[in-house]
Amino acid sequence: MKNATVDKWIRQFLQADPPRAKSVVMTVFGDAITPHGGQAWLGSLIALLAPLGLSDRLVRTSVFRLAEEGWLDAQREGRRSRYRLTATGRRRFERAHDRIYVPAETRWDGKWTLLLSAPEIITASERAQLRRELLWEGFGLIAPGMFGHPCGKSAALQEILDRVDIAGKVFVCTASDLRDVSTRPLAELVAQCWDMERVMLDYRSFIASFQPIARHLDKRGALDPEQAFVLRTLLIHAFRRVQLHDPLLPLALLPDDWPGTVAYDLCRRIYELAWPEAERHIVATLAQEEGAVSQANAEFFKRFGGLSKGQNDAR
């Protein structure tokens, strides 16, 4: 039986901010499909996304465009199509996974990672692609041709250079303040490189939207499986949208009233309450076309520092 309060909240949320079809397809792939083998029949995707207000046509158009853009591979069997992430899509999802589900790093050694490029070495199109990828990863533009971030990010950076095909064409180094030289501290680059006020506003908006439903679930947490799936999807979709603008700076460089920590804890709390019933819905929906569907993999239970595996009755 559906929770009437949650059902009303979902309807109001979808009316106020209906998710873009292609974007929510990506959310469902990352949050729901990846833990169950990383592939799904088109019909199963259509069934999963229907309660979110997406029509058959919108889902078909979205997966077709995602395949064109290199995110998804399509495999045809007769008149049916099965979709899975491409190798590039999987690597990007792994990076997005850490942004969403892994707690923020609390330690920082005071060093920055800097990337410098020279216009005479890389082409204009390479520069544009590099800029786009670095900004998505959270790097800030310090000066023309110079990007920086106060964390190592070496694996992600190497992946970006390989994908843009400019490995060996840029300089990458670490930097820290020289204590014996009177200069502005590197920490002041935060205000120069990132619009942290916007990020804080986005986090506060997320908290305002989801805190009421968290309070309700704390008191009366029973959820219908489909309802739990929709809530979990909207939760991660909304949190992911905020995360896209957050450079994920070390806590030492953030203000004392930083709302990102509260937002992460809120997201974790709701996810913990919703995931068991949501898993029942995911497995049942995928099984309609797939037959036997594996339970969520071990990586799934590491989300948010470790889900309560004992709650998993979705078998």
Image (cartoon, rainbow, N blue to C red):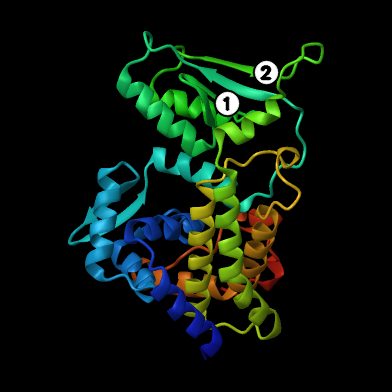
- The crowding category of the residue bearing disc 2, from other C-alpha atoms within 10 Å (few below 14, some 14 to 19, many at least 20), is few
- Image location (x, y in percent) of residue 78: 18, 59
Q: Which residue is mark 1?
A: 148
Asked if the residues shown at circle 1 and circle 2 are in contact, with their CB atoms under 8 angstroms apart, the answer is yes
Name of the residue lying farthest toward the top: 120
Left or right placement of residue 89 versus residue 206 in this view: left
Residue at horizontal 25%, vertical 50%?
A: 65
Whether 65 is drawn above or below 209: the answer is: above
Quadrant in which the C terminus is drawn = bottom right
Q: Of label 1 and label 2, which has the lower sequence position?
A: 1
- Image location (x, y in percent) of residue 307: 68, 62
Numbered circle sitting on residue 279 = none
- Image location (x, y in percent) of residue 167: 45, 17
Front residue of 266/304: it is 266
Question: Amino acid type of disc 1?
Answer: Gly
Residue at horizontal 74%, vertical 19%?
A: 177
Question: Amino acid type of disc 2?
Answer: Ala
Whether 201 is drawn above or below 11: the answer is: above
Front residue of 56/5: it is 5
Q: Which residue is mark 2?
A: 175
Whether 156 is drawn above or below 125: the answer is: below
Rounded to the nearest whole Å, what is the CA distance between mark 1 and mark 2?
A: 9 Å
Residue at horizontal 38%, vertical 68%?
A: 18
Q: Quadrant of residue 119?
A: top left
- The crowding category of the residue bearing disc 1, from other C-alpha atoms within 10 Å (few below 14, some 14 to 19, many at least 20), is many
